[in-house]
Image: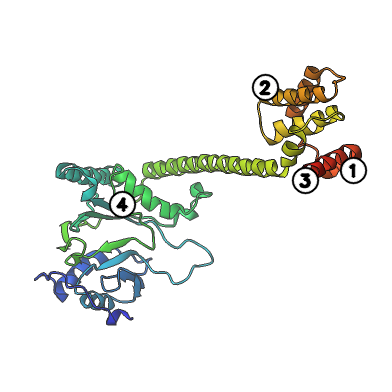
Amino acid sequence: MTLQQQQVSPIRSFEANTDKNIETGLDFILSHFFLEEDPLFPRKISTYKSENKQFPVRSKEEIINSFVDSNFVDCKINAYPYYLTEYKGIQRYKPDFIFIDLDRNDFETEKSFKLALSNTLRNIKVKLGNNNDCIPSVLFTGGGYHIYQPVYCPTALENIIEFNGFDRPSEQFLRFAKYSLSNNKADKNNNPSFKSCLLRVPNSINSKYNKQVTIVQKWNGYRPRLTIDLMDEFLIYLIQKKIDEDNRHRRDQKILEARRSKNRNNNNCYYYEWIDKKILSKPFKDYRKIIVNLILAPYLIVIKKLSFEDAFEIINEWLQQCDLLRKLDFNKKFLVTIALTTAYKKQIPPMKMITLKTNYKDLYFILVQKEKEERIG
């Protein structure tokens, strides 16, 4: 279905919604973009009829026709040009338009909502305009305030050496400015980027609230340079964010490794379950020292991760059963202590059945014989 074939929802009509008034609103928004070095078109817009999906336009007339075709509902235009291709991988967007969205739903009272607006406007004056020069545009959108402040930034921040090593600093600046200038009161669901910085056009209708977008305050045309103080604050923000991300990454890696270790241990326990079935559950007349040193101590310490005391108790009990079958000819406590201490230090897994078959054939055949007896029994 094409955009022309789609039906526009019956939104309450406003007398002010005329071609002339939507053109006036569009001219007001476009006035924020005029710079000799930057193209005005192509640019992307979206409407209610396009289901708020952006599509490119190449002239003012094309924009107006699309807005009229959508009955002036949800008319938005991107603050940044639409570049069809990358230029040799170089960032072409400059963060020269600051967009701050204050949503009424984020505030408990009307007073706190209005206070957030006044504080944001004051911060813009202090941080950008030497206290007096900056007067940004303020629109009431039906559900909150949109604040539009063009700034002068001669190049993408990717081209400035201080910002080398940081991911997409130009785009990150848009989000930093939003929070910094609003004292973290800006809408957290609105994260401006070069491709999604959509501005509502005055005299259009916001379908969510069925209200007309109106101008509260007009931009005075002053485009301030980004100050050294603000850029230093942004650099500190990037450094702290990178530290936080690195710490989070290390924490996630530790959690992942712990899970992997647990899975390995579970798998290892399954792999070595013959030790529980064929050794710990039965006493032995011979090879008790070999079994303790090469199988039981490493199994309980390295694979099952038991404490020294728990492992000592298990082996000691097993040796007591062995002693009933045939008296031990060694110091039980000394043997177990040395075996467990060695297992802790070396962290070498227990000997495998295949290794027993090669190095201790008699012990291997005893285990095989015990398994046959179990089957017969």
Q: Is residue 35 above or below residue 158?
A: below
Q: Is residue 159 above or below residue 271?
A: below
The residue that label 1 is drawn on is: 358
Q: In this rendering, does residue 369 appear at all?
A: yes
The residue that label 3 is drawn on is: 375
Q: Residues within 10 Å of mark 3 (few under 14, many from 20)?
A: few
Q: Is residue 18 left or right of residue 329?
A: left
The amino acid type found where label 4 is placed reads: Pro
Q: Quadrant of the C terminus?
A: top right
Q: Position of residue 99 (x, y in %)?
A: 30, 55
The amino acid type found where label 2 is placed reads: Glu
- Mark 4–mark 1 Cα distance, whole angstroms, equals 81 Å
Q: Quadrant of the N terminus?
A: bottom left
Q: Position of residue 254 (x, y in %)?
A: 57, 39
- Mark 3–mark 4 Cα distance, whole angstroms, equals 88 Å
| Rendered image coloring scheme | rainbow
Q: Earlier in the sequence, mark 2 or mark 3?
A: 2
The residue that label 2 is drawn on is: 309
Secondary element under disc 3, as helix, strand or loop, is: helix
- Mark 2–mark 4 Cα distance, whole angstroms, equals 71 Å
- Mark 1–mark 2 Cα distance, whole angstroms, equals 32 Å
The residue that label 4 is drawn on is: 224
> Label 2 near label 1: C-beta < 8 Å?
no
Secondary element under disc 4, as helix, strand or loop, is: loop
